Image (cartoon, rainbow, N blue to C red):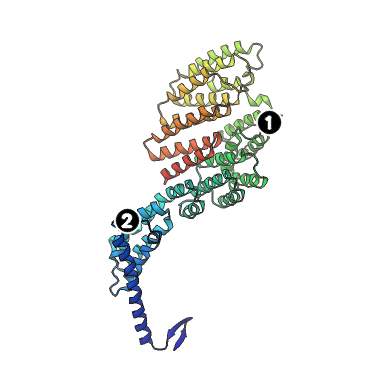
Amino acid sequence: LLTNVNGRLTIFSPGLSASLKSTFSRDMGAVHGRIVSFFRDTFESWHEMHDPYGWRYLVLHCDRLARASRQQDFSVLHWLNEGSFSQLKLERTGMLPSVLKDLRLSLLASLETDDLPRIVSFGCRMAQLRKQESIKTVHRLADAGHLSLAQENGHLISGEPQRFLVWLLFASQTLEAAQWDETLRFLAEADALSKVDMTELDIELAAGLLGGMLAVPGLPGELQTQIEKVLTMDGLTQHGCLAWKTVAKNSHLSASQRADYTKKALDLARKFEQGKTRERLVRELESRMARVSADGDKKKAYPDFLSSAKDPEKEFEKRLKEVRSRQLPVATLAAALIPVSSEEWVDKAFEALLAWVKEIDDEEVLKHSLGGLIQSLEDSQSKELSTALLDALSGQILALTDPTEKSRFLGRFAVLLSFKGRPLEASQRVSLAAATAFSIAESQGRSNALLSLAEKVAVTGPISRARDLAFHALELRA
C-alpha cells in the first residue's frame, strides 16, 4: 500500500492519497477553528487573557486554520496581528522572538496573496519592533532575574557594540550573585563580539563596568584574567588605550593594579601616530603613571613650584595672581596643590580657586578648570575635605546651564565624594545627575549623558544602578 518516493512514504494511488490528505486536512482545520473560537469566545479582550498556551500558539493556530481552508482566508490571522495582541503578548511574556515569528506568518501570508499594503506594513513593523523593543525587553527580563530569556532576546539586538555592552551588563549581574561560571561565560561571549564600531562612550562604559568587576573582593583569578582579556579590545590600539586608561582611574583597585593598567595604556598611546593628540595623551599618562607608581618620577606627577618653595602658602598667593591675570591655568595650580595637600591652608586655597572659577566666562576654559579641580581634589592626600569646600564645588557645578555638562560634572563629583568616604552624598549627586540627564530634550544627548553617568556609577557603586542607567541609555539609542 505504501511506496517510498524521495524519502517520503506515499500511498500507491495518487488519487487516493490526495483524497485522504484533503480529508485529514479538513479535520485539522476544524480542530484549529475550535481552538481559535474558544479563545475568541472566552475572553472579551486580550487584556483579560491569562492563558500561556494562547499567548504562545494562538497565532499559529490562526495560520493553520487559514491554510486548511480551501480558499486560504488569512483574515483571522491578520486581525490578530494587526490589533493589540502582539504588543500585549510582548508585555505579558517578554518573548520578542515569538512575537516576531507571529508577524512573520502574516508577512508570508501577505506575500502569498500579493497583499502589497500588508507586505509593507508587516515588514516595517518587524524591523521597527526588533530595533525598538529588543533592549527594552532585555532590560525588563534582566531586572526580573530571567537572564536566560533575556539572553535569548539579546541576540535580536542590532549591532555588535550594543550586544557587547549588554553582555557585560549580564556579566555584572551574575557577578553580583557570585555566579562565577555564568560570569565567565558571559565575558567569553562578549569578548567574541566585534568592537571595531564602538564609540568612546561605549568603551568608557565597558571599562567602567569591567573595573567595577575587578574591584569585587574575592574575585577568582580566572575571572580576573578573562576581564583583562576583554579590556584588550581585540588588540585595537586606540580602543585598548582608552579602556586601560579608564579602568586605571578606579580608585577602588589596588595601587599595583592601577599602575599596571596605566602602563598598558601608556604603551599603547606611544604607538599612536605622531601629533598633538599623541603628545597630550602620553604626557597625561606619564603624569598618572608617576602618581600611582611607588617609584614614579614625582616631577612628572605634579607641578613642583609649590612643593619646592620655601613658603608654599605665599607661593600659592603669588601664583593665584597669575591665574587671575590668565597667565596660569586653574588646573595647573590645582595640580600643584596635590603634593602639599596635607597642610591645613590647602582647603582654603582650593576655595580661592573655586571663587575665581565663578568669574570665568569662557565655556571651554570653565570646563577645563572644573575638571582639573575635581581631579586634583581626588588625587589629594587629604582623606577629609571640608564641607565648605565641597559645598562651593557643588554650587559651581549646579550653576552650569548646559544639562549635559552639569550631568557629567555631577557624575565626576560623585566619584570624588565616594573616594573621600561620603557614599550617601555621592548617591545623592548621582540621583541629581540622572535627573539632569533625563531632562535633556534630544534623545541622543540624553542617551550619551546616561552612558557617561553609568560609567561613573560603576566606580562609585552599586553596579546594579550603573546597569540600570546603561540599559536606559541603550534603549534611547535604539
**Badge nearest the viewer, 1 or 2:** 2
**Local SS, label 2:** helix
The answer to whether residue 461 is visible is yes
Q: Earlier in the sequence, mark 1 or mark 2?
A: 2
Q: Is residue 303 above or below residue 160?
A: above
Q: Is residue 121 above or below residue 461?
A: below
The x and y percentages for residue 324 are: 50, 15
**Local SS, label 1:** loop
The x and y percentages for residue 244 are: 60, 39
Mark 2, Cα crowd under 10 Å, few <14 / some 14-19 / many 20+, is: some
The residue to which callout 2 is attached is 46
Name the side, left or right, on which 344 lies relative to 17.
right
Q: In the image as oriented, which residue stretches furthest toward the right?
A: 295
Task: Please state, as top left, top right, bottom left or bottom right, where the N terminus lies in the image.
Answer: bottom left
| Pick the front one: 304 or 125 | 125
**Residue visible at 47% across and 51% down?**
159
**Residue visible at 54% across and 45% down?**
173
The residue to which callout 1 is attached is 293
Disc 1 to disc 2, C-alpha distance? 64 Å
The x and y percentages for residue 35 are: 34, 67
| Pick the front one: 306 or 153 | 153
Q: Is residue 183 above or below residue 7?
A: above
